[in-house]
Amino acid sequence: MTRRARRNHSPAFKAKVALAAIKGEKTLAELAQQFDVHANQIKQWKDQLLEGATGLFGGEAKSEPAAPTVDLKILHAKIGELTLENDFLEQALTKAGLLSAKK
């Protein structure tokens, strides 16, 4: 028996199959035969849909936490400040003989 090439299903198809499974009008085996998809795959899509639905209505499951806003001016100023400190300390340690002059 030859193996079938791996298939990629569209999100719309997955949603259609998962909704059919949630309705419960047919068994997973019947849906698997109807849509030509393995029953375990239908079960996974159904579980993903149910999991995602809780987040849709304000459940606790959040897909992506809100990223904190970053002020680039403050970050650039801090980088400049740290660069100055590093240069100053490098010169001081080199003069004191605690750091070799190689770069």
Image (tube, grey):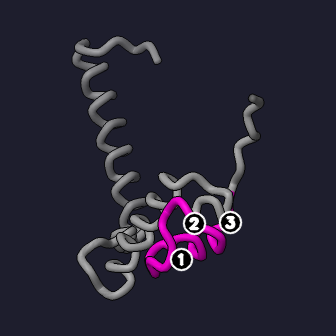
Give the x, y percent position of residue 21: 48, 72
Which quarter of the rendering shows the N terminus?
A: top right
Q: Residues within 10 Å of mark 1 (few under 14, many from 20)?
A: some
Closer to us: 42 or 29: 29
Give the x, y percent position of residue 84: 35, 45
Residue at disc 1, secondary structure: helix
Q: Are marks 3 and 1 in contact (CB under 8 Å)?
A: no
Residue at mark 2 to residue at mark 3: CA–CA distance: 17 Å
Residue at mark 1 to residue at mark 2: CA–CA distance: 8 Å
Q: Which residue is mark 3?
A: 10
Q: Are marks 2 and 3 in contact (CB under 8 Å)?
A: no
Query: What is the number of the mark on residue 20?
Result: 1
> Quadrant location of residue 92?
top left
Magenta stretch: give its range.
9-31
Residue in the picture at 66% in, 64% down: 35
> Quadrant location of residue 52?
bottom left
Q: Nearer the viewer, mark 2 or mark 3?
A: 2
Q: Tag count in the figure? A: 3
Name the residue type under label 3.
Ser
Q: Nearer the viewer, mark 3 or mark 1?
A: 1
> Quadrant location of residue 33?
bottom right
Any part of residue 67 in sight: no
Residue at disc 3, secondary structure: loop
Q: Residues within 10 Å of mark 3 (few under 14, many from 20)?
A: few
Query: What is the number of the mark on residue 31?
Result: 2
Residue at mark 3 to residue at mark 1: CA–CA distance: 16 Å
Q: Are marks 1 and 2 in contact (CB under 8 Å)?
A: yes
Of the numbered discs 2 and 3, the one sitting upstream in the chain is: 3
Residue in the picture at 42% in, 65% down: 48
Name the residue type under label 1.
Ala
Residue at disc 2, secondary structure: helix
